Image (tube, rainbow, N blue to C red):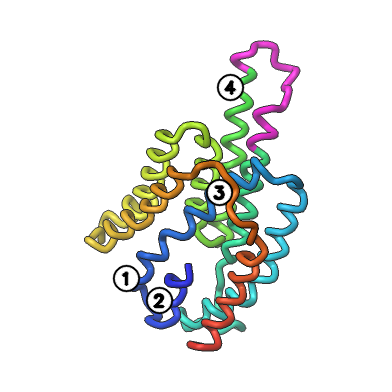
Amino acid sequence: MVVDHFGDAYFKQISWLNLIGRIAFPIFAFQISEGYLHTKNLKKYFLRLFLFALVSQIPFMLFYSVYTNNSIATGTFPLNIFFTLFVGLLAIFLYDKIIHFSFNFVKNKKLKAFFQYLLGFWAVLLLGVFAQICHLDYGLFGIAIIFLFYLFRNNKVSMVLSFVLACIIKYGIPYLDTFNLWYIWLIIFTIIPIVFISLYNKKQGPKVKYLLYFFYPVHLLILYFLFG
């Protein structure tokens, strides 16, 4: 992530450093799906993500203005990655609630299951569209892979295949008319983190979550003051 943002601030355009940076977000997305499963207090988890989204927005806007030459007064800025993680967590939560909702008015079990999953997927899709329209960092793609990591948490093959497909759709299909070697490398580096994710042993690592939360806005401010 730092390498990615340093490349943005220093070169002020897409560079090879951004390829390395593609490794970061899928790991954060996976951590959200794991966080939903293992958090002791979901409300506090939501609140923590939302508060850091608010705290990080001004540093993010300042940093964003460095490499896009936007002014804070007149520029149009996306929302930082914490908003994406928050909405991704919300997508998992709503999907989980919907597929476990009773739907007592539907007597047929198969029809009930169909309605549950259909509404659950629609809820996730609508949140993804919301993320895209409101310019959340990584947009629909970000919400999609957070959800896919949760959906296929017990099936690594499906997780890997769905993630690779999402990366190809994100960086391949929209740029078919200008597709070149750069986009191939972009897809490859975005796919790389699935290797680390697949090796996850389901054991908790060092408890440094608040350090990671604070690190995001702080490093953006440092880059802003260095290159702004």
Disc on the earlier residue, 1 or 4 = 1
Residue that carries the numbered disc 3 in the rendered image: 128
Range of residues picked out in magenta: 95-111
Q: Nearer the viewer, mark 1 or mark 4?
A: 1
Figure check: 23 above or below 32: below
x and y percentages locating residue 46 in the rendered image: 72, 53
Which label was assigned to residue 114?
4
Relative vertical location of residue 114 with respect to residue 188 in this rendering, above or below: above
Which of the 4 quarters of the picture holds residue 218? bottom right
| Cα distance between the residues tagged 2 and 3 | 28 Å
- Residue that mark 1 sits on: 16
Mark-to-mark CA distance, 1 and 4: 45 Å
For mark 2, give the secondary structure. Answer: helix
Instruction: Look at discs 4 and 2 and give the one toward the viewer.
Output: 2
Left or right: where does residue 117 sit relative to residue 156? right
The Cα atoms of the two marked residues, 4 and 2, are separated by 46 Å
Residues at discs 1 and 4 in contact (Cβ within 8 Å): no
Which residue is labeled 2 in the image? 7
Where residue 5 sits: x, y (%)?
A: 46, 73
CB-based contact (under 8 Å), mark 1 and mark 2:
yes
Counting from the top left corner in percent of width and height, residue 136 is at 56, 60
Contact check, label 2 and label 3, Cβ < 8 Å: no
Q: Between 51 and 173, which is closer to the camera in this rendering? A: 51
Mark in front: 2 vs 3? 2
At 46% from the left and 79% from the top, the residue drawn is 68
**Looking at the picture, which amino acid does disc 3 mark?**
Gly
Q: In the rendered structure, which amino acid carries the disc numbered 2?
A: Gly
> Callout 4: helix, strand or loop?
helix
